[in-house]
Image (cartoon, rainbow, N blue to C red):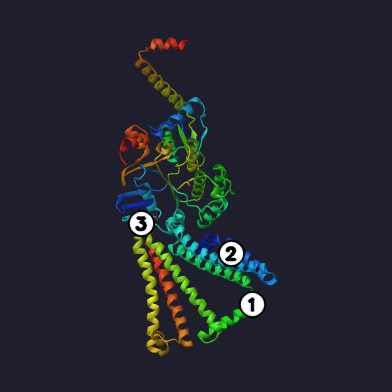
Amino acid sequence: MNSSFNNTKPIYLQIIEKIEIEIISGARSPGERIESVRELAAKLKVNPNTIQRALSELETKKLVETERTNGRFVTKNEAKLKKLKEKYFKEKTKEYILEMEKIGIKITEIRREHEN
Amino acid sequence: MKTKLPLVELKNLTKNYDKKIALKNVNLKLENQKIYGLLGKNGSGKTTLIKLINDLLTPSEGEVLIKGKKPGIESKKIVSYLPERTYLDKSLTVKTAIKEFADFYPDFSFKKAKKLLTQLELDENQKILKMSKGMQEKLQLLLVMSRRAELYILDEPFSGVDPATRDDILDLILENFEENSSLVISTHLISDVERILDEVIFIKNGEIVEFSNAEKLREKENASIDEIFRRRFKNAK
Amino acid sequence: MLNKLIKIDLRSTLKIAPILFGIGFFFALVSFFFSKFGDSTIAEVIADISKNFALSFAISGFINVVTRAIGVFWKKLYSDESYLTHTLPLSKKTIYLSKTLATIYSSLIALFVAFIILVVNYNLFENFDALKNFIEATAGVTGGNVVEFLVLIILVFFFEMTTLISVAFCVIILRHSTTNLKATLLSAGSYLAIQAIFLLSLFLIGLFNPEVMELFKNSDSVSADSMKIIFYTAIIVYGLATVVMNCRNIKLLEKGVNVA
């Protein structure tokens, strides 16, 4: 299947996450233009309304800004971007640690592994 | 304030054949700019419902309204229908079939047709008789998607198509359906199609058993639409 | 729109006939040349055989067109192709009229072509006198005016044909909404009703016109005027029957189709 999305979770949430990662990793630069709903729908191969919803949420989170005639752009707000990165880091780290604890690996072992 | 007329409205729609009840008191409203998945097992009434919308069957009870009117010339001008079977005159070539079809529909776009010919890898000079069933179905898809319709109804567009091609066809459908129009896809191959659906309609034994927003349903049941469908329809028809 | 559809229907109806007519024309030419230029017995034999083949193919061509037209009606309205026909933005009336007119046009074309083949076949250019005498003799039946006779005969034949076509279409339409038995009975019944109306009309005329009344009295001689009246009555009755049957068929279609 072409799409990299998992059908068991709402797709719009997965799209939000995907774009957030792209912003954090620099694949999308601050101030960079975001494709139109239709372009994104075709590229990601999902329903345009789903894209619309994801983009609206990103706008609500102020990670994406709309300039009426020009389209949508990644925010230039450095503080916001920093906060997003931190939040993502914290979340994923916590997830990872919990996963490791499930199989009995403690933080000390993780640290040792990471230093290698 | 004037409430907007639904694109399609089915009111207490029932269809009987000799001894079988194909549709039982169906009530449904379809709106603009939405992609609907009409999902059910074979024989559940999907095709009957679609044929009723397209004036190929008459209701036993109830009514079908398209933009407030019964199916007729006006509705046919705005509905583009892809049936499950081949309806083309097989003695024609691809080129002639397109031209004759376009002759009857003012909303036909030759520009789109040309683009689709390339995307679907069809040779315009080929005789339909000599084409494989899969290619014939692609040609019909071309005809249907080349129209700038308000409602596209595709009945099992993936049957007889290999999995690799299915994705291509789905992308093609997504790219080509008109921006303000609606799309109804009837299929039993749910996992292939669910990512593009706005709303899902589950039909079982001629009755609508579910009509929800796809994402809401996923959230609620924490599963894919395909999985939800399997759970609901185990051992049933 | 109607004309576009008629062109398409005509093409479907006239598909096989050209082959049959082509072969018929070939044999007609053969018989023409061998009759005209052949001296030997062999030439005569070839000419005779060819004459018969030409005639058979001319007739098959015509029959092919008529049966094909009726088959096309069924195919486009009730088979897989009907999924296209019934979803085109056209009224049932347009769809029906197109098939009817295509049937009539193609039948007339077929008749004309068959006629040409026969003209060549029997070398009617030169044997015209024999034909002329034959027609003149037959025209005596309606008083001798050849033109009037031919026009009447052609019109009667034409309207009988259109009536039969509409009955055939009626059978096809009814078979899809009721049982086969009912469909056949209703259609056959309609046709018999038309014949009955024809006879009844003649009888009513006979009440005012003693010459016409003679027809019902088993007499051998029929006056020329009565003959004319018979023809005119037939034309009117079959003409009206055609219109009525076709209107009824259209109404039946408009009630809605149910395609499998």
In this rendering, do the residues under marks 2 and 3 share a single chain?
Answer: no
Name which residue type carries label 1: Asn
Callout 2: SS: helix
Q: Amino acid at mark 2?
A: Phe
Comparing labels 1 and 2, the label whose residue is closer to the camera? 1
Q: Nearer the viewer, mark 1 or mark 3?
A: 1
Name the mark on residue C127: 1
Q: Position of residue C106 (x, y in %)?
A: 53, 66
Task: Please give the label number shown on residue B58.
Answer: 3
Left or right side of A115 for A8: left
Of residues B191 and B200, the one nearer the viewer is B191
Chain letter, disc 1 residue? C
Q: Earlier in the sequence, mark 1 or mark 2?
A: 2
Which chain is disc 2 placed on? C
Q: Residues within 10 Å of mark 1 (few under 14, many from 20)?
A: few
Question: Closer to us: mark 2 or mark 3?
Answer: 2
Q: Is residue C117 above or below residue B40?
A: below
Q: Which residue reaches farthest front? A: C41
Q: Which mark is residue C21?
A: 2
Q: From the viewer's perspective, is B216 left or right of C221?
A: left
